[in-house]
Amino acid sequence: MRISRLKKRLRGDHDFKGHTILGSMCSEPHPIAKRTYKRFLSTNVGDPGLFPKLIKLEKEFISNLGVLLSNPNAKGNVVSGGSEANILAMWTAKNICNAGQNEIIISENCHFSFDKAASLLSLKLIKIPVDSRQRIRVDLAEKAINSNTAAIVGIAGTTGLGVCDPIEKLSEISFKNNIYLHVDAAFGGFVFPFMDNGPKFDFSLPGVKSITIDPHKMGRAAIQSGCIIYRDENIANYVRTPVSYLSGGSTVNNMIMGTRSGASIAAAWMVYNYLGVNGYKKIVKKAMSLTWWFITEVKKIDGLCVKVEPECNVVGVCVNDNYDIKKLINGVRELGWAVSEWPDYMRIAIMPHVTQRALKKFLNDLKKLLLIQSLHS
Ligand code: PLP
């Protein structure tokens, strides 16, 4: 069997180089991440005793991210992605709590990984409405606190609209009430620290106990690499499963995965050190200037608007009452664009692979489709 036959079989799938993917929070990995991943493809850090140096590299990478997030003492792991990191945070919060404490206070705009966590861990999500800027209503979050509260979650870079919950205020109420605060910065974690005046969401806020941050989104690392970062070693040790049989010797596993790719760790470490803070600043600056340009162009089109001004490179495009968003989304999809669909908007993520040229073409297609809708109404 030749690889060309496989390529032929998979032809037609989207590809980050094809300039049609406008709705993904992942991107083409950096070339250095790809090369490194390939080199360490066969490593399995699920048996850590076999790869002690890779484990050391993982610890170093987590510590690097800790420094980025204002806490050099942070501990954690590279896991499969933001979903696993969020589930681990909820598992940790549950293990820290007393039996019976099972309520998680969270924005109604949360990622679906929290619904999974709730189902797996028998937790109850108390979904709090958002304000006009699509951020969790802290007054309502505070009112929801009771003796069953296990954790509060803040989102730094929401999946649909790229806004940041008021984490400083969530930290205040969590700290005051001695409640675990987890921050889901799966997307914003590789954006906000590299902005001049990005929102505050990290361990400098005393209530924050853990953070999800994903190198495989804006970090330009290879899929799969998400990270769960805990404030300290004590918190990091609340999820632990002893394993005795591994060929590298008995150990403790504190993740969901067993077998785990060392290639993800090596690639994330490599690209992080290669780009450095200045490299990421450039990536974020470029993505944000394209985001503001795109928003300006959207607003120029009769019938289109943005759901809310985002705080990072995620834009919710909606239509006025004369048009049908569902039809518009179906229309752009038929023309080959991959966009994400929400009930009243389409999400465009301006990732590093997204070009101004592709966006211009997309905006033209939107105009044409709106014209067709107006002619048929
Ligand atoms: N959290 C947020 C805010 C996200 O946007 C996403 C994915 O888009 C996730 C968590 C889940 O990440 P993953 O798809 O890597 O599991």
Image (cartoon, grey):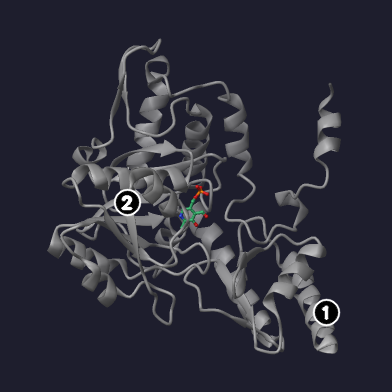
Q: Mark 2 vs mark 1: which is more N-terminal?
A: 2
Q: Quadrant of residue 31?
A: top right
- Which amino acid, by three-letter code, is at mark 2? Leu
Q: Quadrant of residue 140?
A: bottom left
Q: Could you say whether the residue bearing mark 2 is in a helix, strand or loop?
A: loop
| Residue at figure coordinates x 46%, y 64% from the top left | 158
Crowding at dot 2, Cα within 10 Å, few <14 / some 14-19 / many 20+, comes out as many
Q: Is residue 16 left or right of residue 180?
A: right
Q: Would you name the residue on which mark 1 appears?
A: 368
| Residue at figure coordinates x 53%, y 39% from the top left | 224
- Which amino acid, by three-letter code, is at mark 1? Lys
Q: Which mark is residue 123?
A: 2
Q: Where is residue 32 drawn, in percent x and y? A: 59, 38
- Mark 2, mark 1: which one is toward the viewer? 2
| Residue at figure coordinates x 42%, y 15% from the top left | 50
Q: Of residues 289 and 117, which is closer to you in this image?
A: 117
Question: Label 2 to label 1, Cα distance in Å?
Answer: 47 Å
Q: Where is residue 180 drawn, in percent x and y? A: 22, 54
Residue 72 visible in rendering: no
Residue 327 visible in rendering: yes
Q: Is residue 360 left or right of residue 248?
A: right
Q: Where is residue 13 drawn, in percent x and y? A: 77, 47
Question: Ligand 1 within 8 A of label 2's CB?
Answer: no
Q: Could you say whether the residue bearing mark 1 is in a helix, strand or loop?
A: helix
Q: Where is residue 131 drawn, in percent x and y? A: 39, 79
